[in-house]
Image (cartoon, rainbow, N blue to C red):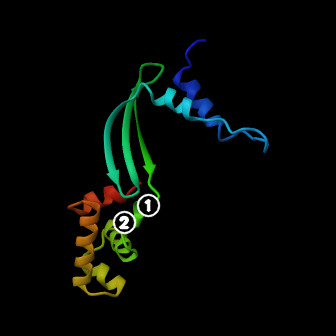
Amino acid sequence: MPAKTLTQTLEELQSFGHKRLRRSTRVPDPAPLIVRLLGPCKTLAVEQRVSGVAFQLCGVTDSAAPFTITCLLHSPAGKAILTTAEQAVAELLCEGRTLAQVASLRGVSLNTVKSQVRQVFRKLNVDSRVALVRQLSP
């Protein structure tokens, strides 16, 4: 049996979402297709995020053209690290708000916001707003 091309594997994998299955029909396992698709890829980067783990893979298509793909494995417990107040502060910081604006919008003191920002940075292991945005973005 000849090896399937990358394009054929992708098409087969995409067809899983379009098949109508009867109740008695067993759902096909896409894992072998994903392994065939990503097996020859090399890992470029792995990054821990609040929402899960992001990793970047590189490989070569059927026509020898290089490609990269970024995948995110979601962790359902990821956002549970931050309290509701800390999540709200983090989202406002990601929007580019100043600490004073965050305090005003949240109806708390500037010192409370500073404390919450320290906690967010500590819990997410970041040291800047840029790193925070990277952590929280999908």
Residue 86 at x, y percent in the picture = 34, 73
Asked if residue 118 is positioned above or below residue 39 in the image, the reply reads below
Residue occupying the point 38% across, 35% down = 57
Circle on res. 81: 2
CA distance for labels 1 and 2? 7 Å
User: Is disc 1 placed on a helix, strand or loop?
Assistant: loop
State the quadrant of the N terminus.
top right
**Callout 1 crowding tier (Cα within 10 Å): few <14, some 14–19, many ≥20:** few
| Left or right placement of residue 128 versus residue 60 in this view | left
- Contact? badges 1 and 2 (CB < 8 Å): yes
Circle on res. 31: none
Residue 104 at x, y percent in the picture = 31, 85
Foreground pick, 132 / 75: 75
* Quarter of the rendering containing residue 14: top right
Asked if residue 56 is positioned above or below residue 37 in the image, the reply reads below
State the quadrant of the C terminus.
bottom left
Q: Label 2 sits on what residue type? A: Ile
Foreground pick, 97 / 72: 72
| Left or right placement of residue 12 versus residue 19 in this view | left
User: Is disc 2 placed on a helix, strand or loop?
Assistant: helix
**Callout 2 crowding tier (Cα within 10 Å): few <14, some 14–19, many ≥20:** some
User: Residue at the top extreme?
Assistant: 1
Asked if residue 38 is positioned above or below residue 52 in the image, the reply reads above
Residue 137 at x, y percent in the picture = 38, 57
Q: Label 1 sits on what residue type? A: Ala
* Quarter of the rendering containing residue 59: top left
Residue occupying the point 41% across, 66% down = 80
Instruction: Say which residue label 1 marks.
Output: 77
Residue occupying the point 29% across, 83% down = 103
| Left or right placement of residue 122 versus residue 53 in this view | left
